Image: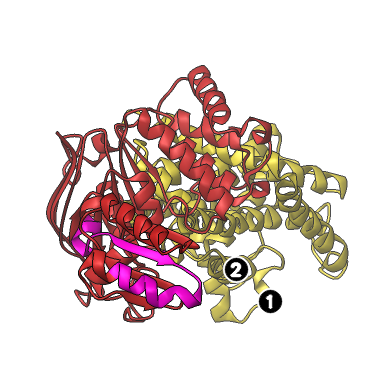
Amino acid sequence: MKTVTAEHLIKSYNKGEVRALDDLSIDVTEGTVLGVLGPNGAGKTTTVRVLATLLKPDSGSAHVAGIDVIKHPDKVREVIGLSGQYAAVDETLTGWDNLVMFGRLYHLGKQESINRANDLLERFSLTESARRTIKSYSGGMRRRLDLAASLIVQPKVLFLDEPTTGLDPRGRMEMWGVIEELVTGGVTVLLTTQYLEEADQLADEIAVIDHGKVIARGTSDVLKRQVGGERLEITVENSEVVKVQEIVARISAHAPHIEGRTVSAPVSTGSTALIEALRALDEVSIHPLDIGLKRPSLDDVFLSLTGHVAEETVSQPVKRKRGGKR
Amino acid sequence: MKHLLSDSIVITKRQILQLARIPELLIFSTIQPVMFVLLFRFVFGGSIQTSQPGGYVQLLMPGIFVQTVAFTLAATASGLAQDMTKGLIDRFRSLPISRGALVIGRTFGDALLNILVLAVMAAAGFAVGWRPTSGFTRVALGFLFLFSFGYALSWIGIYVGLVVRDARVVQNVGFLVTFPMTFLSNAFAPTTGMPRALQYVAEWNPVSSMVAACRQLFGLKNEFGATATSWPSQHPLETSLLYIIILMAIFIPLSVRKYANSSS
């Protein structure tokens, strides 16, 4: 069952000059995580804002948990959680204040709001800093609190808009842990990211978007396969490169690619190719520095799909508006 | 809709909590009016001659009360603008809360702040010689007028905050509105010394009507020059009430609509 569907969404800014969403259609299966992957300005945030009832599209339709987003935004708001790119919490208040306030705004009773706040603070390891104002929180703590705020009423659908953008590696790892835990709880998640690694790690399925359109869709494996199969990659001492080149050529039946001391070529037999290569190397007494089957990364996927790498924003028109972010 | 009031109150509580978490905010918003009381009382007070029994401070206090509630317009505007520009507004919008709650809650919060500030100022005024002579009921009615005027103005603040959106710019806009409004009036000096044309401008200024209304309620005689026969001069209470109603009738619907449409 599809918990989130969006069909033919169009949203333009500046009197049609900039199309943030250009006939975008997307859906998320119940209980899964869809990673929406794309560079800045691709339309990720605009998509989330439409689905989370913050923005009306110019045309197209969208449903969340079976509810029409455009016709019944109030009902949609009761079943979704949204955690944005910036921590959407009141900085002058404490973590506890914030969660209790949001609980009250979800129309929970006073005691229930307090209990819920305490639970969530505990769950997100924020109990110790619960009574400190958000101003004193680190970036990672803010995001965790923000995520906690979007879980006050167990949402059916959770929208995470670039949940780790701007976090340091440690903050990102913590956030990933938290999100993974949530997903095991069964919530349906739509997650946007510009980090390929993140989509690979967290998402069941990935939709790659660029210029307001979905340009590819599938599991990370499928997408990677779309770019090309596995490659056998062997790194050896300089003196052995020529010998290894012969071996690789024999196994692969393709001309090997040489980069420094690394020899690589596409293979179709998977681990068999690896075993063959090891045997062949052993016969000539070459001990490789590194050997392995390399599958294409999502970076490769993105590059081959869009013709530009994910982080690159320079090629975007300078005035391109980033989906209503102000 | 059924949660409008309770949601608004949650937002108001949030504002009170903010003051509790950052007490400096509260201290500075009460120091400023007290400073004005002292400055005007002791710096200008000596050089402004008046025939009022009790001296200039009697005329001054209504003026400063009105000025202070007018200045909260800027605070309302910048507070709201701050909410609107940070990500927080997206969170509020994605919650199942009543549409107007965020702005209504803020006007409640600023109204409470106004009560506190008026009380502090009244105490400061009392300390420097302000003695209203009209009895409790009329003095209380005067404060009710001040409170209502402040509430009406906070809706202008809401509108400015929604339209301008940048908190720093909002501060300047608020200042641009309130400064001439409070000084081009009878609040600190009698309008009789102004050029004739300006006297009329000052007289139709809501601030003047409010000041005149308060003076009347506090038991003072108003002084008018060229405008002595104009309707606002003769009926400051009615004029003030009318202004309060008109301001609310214009800016409440305008602001609520602006807020509802402000994100798409």
Question: Residue B175, labelled with which disc?
Answer: 2
Q: Front-most of B75 and B127? A: B75
At label 1, the amino acid type is Gly
Decide if residue A133 is in sight here.
Answer: yes
Q: Which chain has been coloured yellow in this picture? A: B
Coordinates of residue A264 in the picture (x, y in percent)? 34, 69
The residue drawn where x is 40% and y is 49% is B90
Question: Which segment did they paint magenta?
Answer: A223-248
Q: Name the residue under label 1.
A: B193
Coloring basis for residues: by chain
**Magenta stretch containing residue B141, yes or no?**
no
Q: Mark 1 lies on which chain?
A: B
**What secondary structure is marked by label 2?**
helix
Return the residue found at the far top.
A111
**Magenta stretch containing residue A227, yes or no?**
yes
Foreground disc of the pair 2, 1 = 2
Q: Which of marks 2 and 1 is nearer the N terminus?
A: 2
**Are labels 2 and 1 assigned to the same chain?**
yes
What color does chain A have in the rendering?
A: red
Position of B137 relative to A268 (above/below): above
Q: Quadrant of the C terminus of chain A?
A: bottom left
